[in-house]
Amino acid sequence: MHVLVPMDDSEMAERALEYALDVYDDAEITVLTVVGEPSFMWGEAASIALADDMEAAAEEHGQAVADRAGEIAADHDTEVDVTIRTGHPARAILDADADFDAIVLGSHGGSVADRLMVGNVAETVFRRASVPVTVVR
């Protein structure tokens, strides 16, 4: 079995990984972290200025999440694979779902903005994924 655990730096995402490691203890687990891209609404100049730094910022943010995922997995005496992508989180998760047998994700992030965005991501993935989805609170 191969399980996808989308993860950001929120407590809910950590809970989702803990859940996946406990419930799918014999499965291969891949952690996916998605870093958003600059929006056209930011204006063309801002998007161009940020484009050069996006890859480095994505790698830096992704590495912090990867490190935390590795720590959580080590506490369970196992390892996880980590994939870092840029883009819209729900779209990136749904683009990858066919390669997995299940998805386990947190219900929302920590801040109000995270709860709105990630809550929408969880709902979108839950409704549209082609594999079973578990939402952890």
Image (cartoon, grey):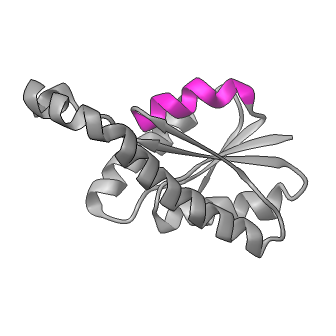
Regarding residue 39, the answer to whether it shows in the image is yes
Q: Nearer the viewer, residue 58 or 98?
A: 58
Which quarter of the picture shows residue 38? top left
Total marks shown come to 0
Note whether 40 is above or below 135 in the view shown: above
Instruction: Pick out the residue farthest to the bottom.
Output: 75
The span picked out in magenta is 88-99
Quadrant containing the N terminus in the rendered view: top right
Q: Residue at x 17, y 28 (%)?
A: 48
**For residue 19: magenta?**
no
Q: Residue at x 26, y 32 (%)?
A: 51
Q: Residue at x 74, y 33 (%)?
A: 100
Q: Position of 112 compared to 122: left or right?
A: left
Name the chief secondary structure element in magenta.
helix
Residue 3, percent across and down? Answer: 75, 43
Note whether 48 is above or below 134 in the view shown: above
Note whether 90 is above or below 66 in the view shown: above
